[in-house]
Image (cartoon, grey):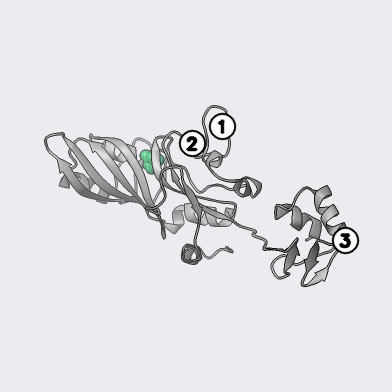
């Protein structure tokens, strides 16, 4: 790619500003000062230093967000705050988007990236990516419900694939339950609708994991961090360029 484009994308300023930097001999490529904006570089290999700063080009970026309630899993919205509003300028410049959706009142793990192929692979029904949720439920979940989940719950418009329901706690007096639910699909309101099909209601829903990615417990609601090298290595199972 052109050197000036690379510098702009690396956050060194506008096209005009980076031209000035080049003119002032502030940029070197592999140790050699370059002054022409048209210089072609291989951004994956060449070492570009601008004003003493080593710039590494990132094609794809990956953010783990602990989505809070009240924000929507979209990139733009006229009414509500979106998950993009919680991220930084790099995320906007790189045009990241959420990998799948969580309802406005669901909180927990959300991956955002600009890697469309990864998103596609993680969301593909064929890949059977497990999503683990923890749900607070109004009503008492039973062994019958566990079986119902395992058989595949029939909803109005489709039959769910077999899913796992684990009862973590039951409060007989308050008539509430805490459950862990693992599904391989991600249809609209799916977890809530599955619980509703058992005659109970989800009152709080949190996503804890998606495939090999687990929500970092150190992230408070609304906080994010970039994926670590270890997490990225786990995403190699999806067999796409990362
Ligand atoms: N299932 C739901 O019902 N809501 C979500 O946000 C995610 C899964």
* As drawn, 28 above or below 73: below
Q: Position of residue 199 (x, y in %)?
A: 23, 34
Q: Residue at x 79, y 66 (%)?
A: 28
Q: Is residue 121 left or right of residue 18?
A: left
Q: Is residue 103 left or right of residue 58?
A: left
Give the farthest residue toward the bottom: 31
Q: Position of residue 220 (x, y in %)?
A: 41, 46
**Towards the viewer: 31 or 2:** 31
Q: Residue at x 85, y 62 (%)?
A: 25
Circle 3 sits on which residue? 36
Q: Residue at x 20, y 44 (%)?
A: 145
Alpha carbon distance from label 3 to label 1:
41 Å
Q: Quadrant of ligand 1?
A: top left
Circle 2 sits on which residue? 72
The answer to whether any part of residue 37 appears in the image is: no
* As drawn, 48 above or below 172: below
Give the farthest residue toward the left: 173
* As drawn, 11 above or below 35: above
Q: Earlier in the sequence, mark 2 or mark 1?
A: 2
User: Mark 3: few, some, or many residues within 10 Å (few <14, many ≥20)?
Assistant: some
Circle 1 sits on which residue? 77
Alpha carbon distance from label 2 to label 3:
44 Å
Q: Residue at x 25, y 38 (%)?
A: 137
């Amino acid at each position: 790619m052109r050197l000036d484009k690379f510098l702009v994308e690396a956050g060194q300023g506008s096209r005009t500003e980076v031209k000035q930097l080049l003119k002032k001999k502030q940029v070197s490529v592999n140790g050699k000062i370059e002054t022409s904006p048209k210089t072609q570089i291989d951004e994956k290999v060449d070492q570009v230093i601008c004003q003493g700063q080593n710039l590494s080009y990132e094609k794809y970026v990956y953010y783990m967000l602990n989505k809070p309630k009240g924000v929507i899993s979209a990139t733009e919205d006229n009414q509500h705050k979106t998950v993009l509003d919680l991220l930084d300028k790099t995320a906007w410049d790189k045009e990241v988007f959420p990998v799948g959706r969580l309802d406005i009142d669901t909180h927990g793990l959300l991956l955002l990236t600009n890697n469309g192929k990864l998103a596609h692979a993680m969301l593909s029904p064929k890949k059977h990516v497990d999503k683990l949720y923890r749900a607070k439920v109004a009503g008492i979940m039973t062994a019958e419900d566990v079986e119902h989940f395992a058989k595949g719950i029939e909803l109005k418009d489709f039959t769910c694939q077999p899913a796992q329901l684990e009862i973590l706690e039951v409060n007989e007096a308050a008539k509430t339950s805490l459950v862990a639910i693992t599904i391989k699909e991600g249809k609209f309101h799916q977890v809530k609708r599955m619980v509703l099909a058992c005659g109970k209601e989800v009152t709080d829903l949190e996503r804890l994991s998606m495939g090999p990615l687990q929500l970092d417990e150190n992230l408070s609601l609304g906080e994010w961090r970039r994926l670590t090298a270890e997490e990225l290595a786990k995403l190699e199972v999806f067999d796409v360029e990362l």
